[in-house]
Amino acid sequence: MKDFEEIRRLWRVQSSEPVNIEDVFKRIDEQKNSYVNRLLLQTITIGIALLFIFTVWITATFHTWTSHLAMIIIIGSMIYYLRIQINDYRKINKTTVLFKKPDEYIAYLQSYKKSRFKLNTKTYQVYVIIISLSLCLFAIEMYYILPFWQLLIYIVLSIGWMLICQFVFMKQYNRREAQRLEEIIQALERLSNQFTQTL
């Protein structure tokens, strides 16, 4: 307990020291670039997956209309998500506001963080329902062309994959994304506070 109090005391002393503006800008820029690069990688990945699924749809022979409907639903969902990713990439990549008006950029990032949280929770739930519906429609095709045990494997793997994405990958992704944005916001707030104190 004594060690914990010592660490707390040191933290208070360090936190009251003035912030080096150049270091903060450099850190903010690095964190922002890391986040932007991640968004860009996700956008490219979605684009490649969309191209792959569209190619499969065009080249594969489907026997039921439900498979075509499933592919249209999946492609439509991916186009919607791709559009969101491209818009977010463009918005977050703008740096002019960061250096001219840090308070406005902080407010923008806080609003952006809330919108991304909504996207990664409520909108993602709708996305999961739509993809699940598509997999169910596609299972009708599988019913006619696969033996029952293979159909069962398809159903189990589909349900398993959706559950893993929902309860493992998405939770980790939400936590990491929120943490990255919060680090940028906190660094800007420290910088803004220092400007306010020196004026």
Image: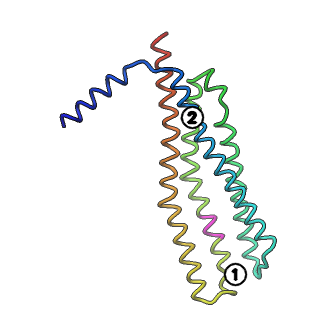
Which disc, if any, is residue 141?
1
Q: Foreground: 37 or 192? A: 37
CB atoms of marks 2 and 1 within 8 Å? no
Q: Is residue 44 magenta?
A: no
Q: Which residue is mark 2?
A: 30
Query: Counting other residues with Cα less than 10 Å from the Cα at mark 1, is it few (<14), some (14-19), or many (20 or more)?
Result: some
Residue in view at x 54 percent, y 46 percent: 117
Left/right of residue 86 with respect to residue 149 in the rendered view = right
Q: Which of the marked residues, 2 or 1, is nearer the chain's N terminus?
A: 2
Residue in view at x 45 percent, y 13 percent: 197
Which quadrant would residue 9 be assigned to in this image?
A: top left
Q: In this picture, which residue range is highlighted in magenta?
A: 129-134
Left/right of residue 60 with respect to residue 196 in the rendered view = right
Q: Foreground: 81 or 172? A: 172
Q: Foreground: 64 or 27? A: 27
Q: Main secondary structure of the magenta part?
A: helix
Residue in view at x 66 percent, y 82 percent: 142
Query: Which residue is most to the top?
Result: 199
Q: Position of residue 4 (x, y in %)?
A: 24, 35
> Residue flagged by tag 2: what amino acid is it?
Glu
Which quadrant would residue 131 be assigned to in this image?
A: bottom right
Query: Which residue is most to the left?
Result: 2
